[in-house]
Amino acid sequence: MPHSPEIIDPGSLPRAAFAFPGPLRDQLVAAIIDGRKVATTALLIEYERAGEDLPKVGARATVVDSADRPVAVIEVTDVRVAPLGEVDELHARDEGEGHTTVAEWRAAHEEFWHSQAMRSELGDAAFTVDDTTPAVLERFRMVADLRTP
């Protein structure tokens, strides 16, 4: 497992919460820790609605599990904004969710983005995505496993 030689204070870093608490978050966190997940996708509108800046290369964040416990520190290695229709197979596979095609990846992500929870989070009961929807495609590496042995 990757460990950074320098001291990392996870409490001083922003928190990275993948999906909503529950089985999906637990699956994603496990994939980060075991190295299968090195990419993620968010919608640009999520950042805009939250008033947050896009991730920056070199930025670190503390990954939290469904119980809001810090479990890992990740570092952003690449960020780009692209229409959903331009997501490629490499990115889909590198999200570590077992998708072998872009179509599988897209179907799973649309189910999440069109869910009641996501629509509620965005404040738009009819929210939907299409090929032109701007997405934030982020790549990262785990630099510390914070779980105690």
Image (cartoon, grey):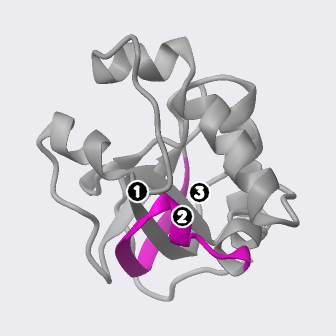
Residue 105 horizontal/vertical position (percent): 73, 54
Q: Residue at x 46, y 68 (%)?
A: 137
Which SS does the magenta portion mostly show? strand
Q: Kindly identify the amino acid type of the residue bearing the numbered disc 2.
A: Gly
Circle 1 residues within 10 Å: few <14, some 14–19, many ≥20: few
Could you say which disc has been placed on residue 146 in the image?
3
**Residues under labels 3 and 2: Cα distance?**
36 Å
Dot 1 or dot 3, earlier in sequence: 1
**In the picture, which quadrant includes the N terminus?**
bottom right
Q: Which residue is drawn at 68% across and 61% down?
A: 32
**Residues under labels 1 and 2: Cα distance?**
6 Å
Q: 133 or 28, which lies in front?
A: 133
Q: Kindly identify the amino acid type of the residue bearing the numbered disc 3.
A: Leu
Q: What stretch is highlighted in magenta?
A: 71-89
The residue tagged 2 is: 85
Are the residues flagged by discs 1 and 2 in contact, CB closer than 8 Å?
A: yes
Dot 3 or dot 2, earlier in sequence: 2
Could you say which disc has been placed on residue 132 in the image?
1
Dot 1 or dot 2, earlier in sequence: 2
Q: Is residue 149 above or below residue 18?
A: below
Residue 38 horizontal/vertical position (percent): 63, 72
Residue 85 sits inside the magenta stretch = yes
Q: Is residue 14 visible?
A: yes
Answer with the quarter of the image where residue 97 lies: bottom right
